[in-house]
Amino acid sequence: MTSNTLPVVPHWIGGAAYPSASGRTAPVFDPALGVETKRVALADASEIEAAIASAKAAFPAWSGMSLAKRQTILFRFRELLDARKGELAEIITSEHGKVLSDALGEISRGQEVVEFATGLAHHLKGEFSEEVSTGVDVYSTRQPLGVVGIISPFNFPAMVPAWFFPIAIAAGNTVVLKPSEKDPSAAIWLAELWKEAGLPDGVFTVLNGDKEAVDGLLTHPDVAAISFVGSTPIARYVYETGTRHGKRVQALGGAKNHMLVLPDADLDLTADSAINAGFGSAGERCMAISVVVAVEPVADALIAKIAERMAALRIGDGRRGCDMGPLVTKQHRDKVAGYIDIAEADGATVVVDGRTVNPDGDPNGFWLGPTLLDRVPTSSRAYTEEIFGPVLAVVRVPSFEAGVDLINAGTFGNGTAIFTNDGGAARRFQKEVRVGMIGINVPIPVPVATFSFGGWKDSLFGDTKAHGSEGVKFFTQLKAITSRWLDPSHGGINLGFPKND
Ligand code: NAD
């Protein structure tokens, strides 16, 4: 098939597939085969307008629907997702490349947020104070914002949107999701599932596109809030542009996550964890471990254990039971491989070189094997920049304090972990390290849905994290009501500022 005859992933507007007439499309690849399998529609101004108008039109009825009825739809969505997640995992693997078990893992973490959102009647409860002044009560309610935009990255095409949309929808908002153009089909599948669950048309919209669609959401007066996840430069741009246009914005950015290993750590647990967190999803996770900070004299023994495990990893097509799949595009694969060249040129030792790899898959796939670098200079761009691929760097430090200082000197602050059997050191680490999510002998400390996900520093712009109580706060606005029902002692005219007595 040529690009002209490939199927085009449409938008989803008004509860139905909405073919694009913009004339602009982008390629979607099967990364394990290295071939373009589809095109994705790139919205133009009229399609952006249609998507937002449909979401706006659906808002009054949806926000006016009882919590009990909304909850029933959420429960149905959860049941359908649980029963049919295998279909979604296959879609994710065919466009992202991650292995099927990993795709199922991301779906289950997204489902967790749906389950959290089914408790909407509890989450949306207000507060009440009786008799704050004579005959006066005060109470608060949480009300939805209106149309909210979600802009998501390629690396979790189901889970990242699901960090936001279940809570946004449960709270009574209507959602316009702009997925990554690299793997857009998961969003359309989720839209169909919402329809089957009984969600009214227009409550969940998918707008496919690129910068033009993003800018449309960021500047449109009918969009009240934006939840963004992606790289730091775009997160900063989204935060600045969205807030300048009067919107509430949370923009989660990139990461460079360090794992501090103390000499007393259990080295088998640590090596397993470094492998799982470094090379799972080919390192294309914002919570991937990309730097092992080894407190001497632990480095040599740890590197030997990590390298031994790397030799046993099966790299190949995610549908063949392999451990690690390809990278998302050829361009990204080449960019990541370029960082290995940079590290080597800057004096790092390449302990395991993924630039040559023998995959269990089509030779045209976007393959790059797991790579282990030792003695990476902290001045190298391979250390300072986010690589977002299967490249694990080891930096050796003389002490716990030097390790914490190194982590704190970084510009990112998404996740970090400490591996040790010393409770006092772990306690000091969690207190002193300036990072948003901390693991103690846990390499990928993604909090469960009842807590909130998000980093510090250049890993999050805005003041609200994803899901948990912060998610409920982000997607609602608080209203305080002061009420008095007249009784004979209401006091009459008084032009002074109301004081409580
Ligand atoms: P990206 O920033 O390239 O794209 C994210 C979204 O922004 C996409 O929907 C894309 O279409 C849009 N976009 C891209 N360029 C744009 C531009 N110039 N103007 C407006 N919109 C634009 O990110 P990606 O490559 O899809 O995803 C990987 C990045 O996401 C990594 O940096 C990773 O760390 C980060 N990420 C962060 C988290 C987190 O929780 N902090 C989670 C997942 C991914």
Image (tube, rainbow, N blue to C red):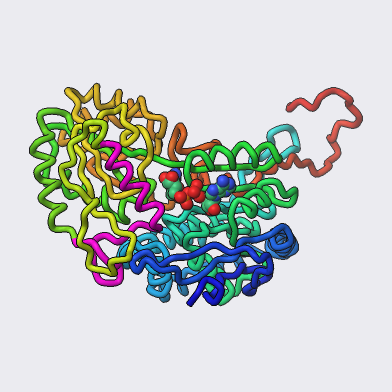
The residues colored magenta run 314-343
Is residue 321 rendered magenta in the image? yes
Residue 176 falls left or right of residue 340: right
Pick the front one: 51 or 4? 4
Residue at 68% across, 59% down: 44
Quarter containing the C terminus: top right
* Residue 183 on image: x %, y %: 47, 62
> Extreme right residue here?
493
Q: Is residue 227 visible?
A: no
Res 10 → quadrant: bottom right
Is residue 157 rendered magenta in the image? no
Residue at 13% across, 58% down: 312
Res 85 → quadrant: bottom left
| Marker count (numbered) | 0
* Residue 218 on image: x %, y %: 66, 47
* Residue 344 on image: x %, y %: 23, 37
Pick the front one: 171 or 466? 466
Residue at 43% across, 38% down: 455
* Residue 404 on image: x %, y %: 28, 26
Q: Is residue 271 visible?
A: yes
